[in-house]
Amino acid sequence: MTPHLLQAVQLSWSPRLRITRAEGDCEGVLRRSASEILDRPLETVLGTSPDKARLLDALAREERRAVEFLSGTFGKEDAVPLRLTLGMDTGEATAVVLDLRALLRHAPPVQLSGLASQLSHELRNPLSSVKMAVQTLARNTGLSERDQRRLTIANREVRTLERMLWVLSEYARDSTPTMEPHAPRSLVEEALALVAPELAERRVEVRVDEAADIPRVRMDTNRLRPVLAQVLLNMAMGQAQGGQVVVSIRPGPPGRVSLVLEDPAGTLTEEERGSLFEPFKSSLARGAGLSLAALRQVLVHQGSEVSAKAGPEAGTVFTLTFAV
């Protein structure tokens, strides 16, 4: 293999979990040169925990070409999403490591869509197993209050990952949408129901302001609902406790209905105007940086539109336009 061409790093390590070989774009992926990596502990090089390093070693030695994902923490830098393909090479445990953020940042749309679909598929099954285990533990009435709090946190994070998978799968999907008449207010309420626990935890209210006599519009609610839910939650995450996000439903141009989302905490800069709905380009997408791109992708496939402009005083106003 040629790790440099793949923007990847190939690592090998000894049974004592110390790096014996490092090839490829070490500085770009792992934020260190190859010479700085050699003979360092595996957990230090990957920016992870000793327990996780031992698990990776065990998976590599099973020789199943297992794929693992982790967030590498390198000094004061934000956590870096890494994808590892594990196995054995010339008798040593080995991993090919990719920096997903850098890989996707330069990927063309077709490649990005395919990778999003692959990631969604690979993560969904193990996440379902984790969710089932957490729910089973939560039914134990003998748990201490501290353990109950831990399970509540675990449940919340599972829901977060499920929503991220929905966003990934919707960005990658290219099938024909199922269009049916639907009330815009019902769409918003259904989307809010998906993130109700998180909104309650943050004590953020999403207020729906609907004009009179709004007709039904044509949309594929199953595909739009989870993406809209993530966008609304991202807006709520930018609010202080007790804050409010306003959603207005108004008549649009002839034969259209507008759904307006007001994000008071999101500042639309000049630099972001041209790339707002591109993957991983906008800070307004928050989180993984894909929610606004997925929203636009879903809407365009349904014959709808989304635009954004700076608010009259502060923040950003998003307008979703649907055909009646």
Image (cartoon, rainbow, N blue to C red):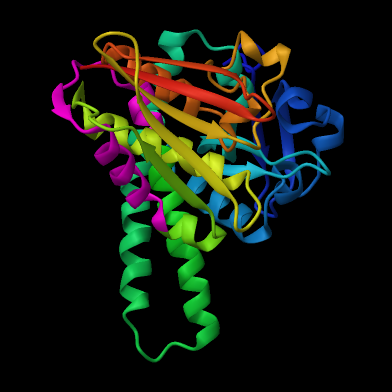
- Count of marks overlaid on the render: 0
At 28% from the left and 8% from the top, the residue drawn is 254
At 33% from the left and 32% from the top, the residue drawn is 211
Query: Farthest bottom residue?
Result: 142
Q: Main structural element of the magenta stretch: helix, strand or loop?
A: helix
Estimate the x, y position of residue 200 in percent, counting from the top left: 48, 61
User: Which range is magenta?
Assistant: 167-196
At 44% from the left and 27% from the top, the residue drawn is 260
Estimate the x, y position of residue 171 in percent, counting from the top left: 38, 23
Left or right: residue 199 versus residue 270 is: left
Left or right: residue 49 versus residue 289 is: right
Tell me where residue 215 sits by quadrant: top left
33 or 238, nearer to the observer = 238
Estimate the x, y position of residue 42 in percent, counting from the top left: 71, 47
**Quadrant location, the N terminus:** top right
Residue 66 visible to the viewer: no
Left or right: residue 9 versus residue 167 is: right
Q: Can you say whether 130 is above or below 91 in the image?
A: below
Is residue 38 shown in magenta?
no
Estimate the x, y position of residue 128 in percent, counting from the top left: 31, 53
Is residue 181 shown in magenta?
yes
Residue 146 visible to the viewer: yes
161 or 4, nearer to the observer = 161
Left or right: residue 96 versus residue 34 is: left
**Quadrant location, the C terminus:** top left
149 or 276, nearer to the observer = 276
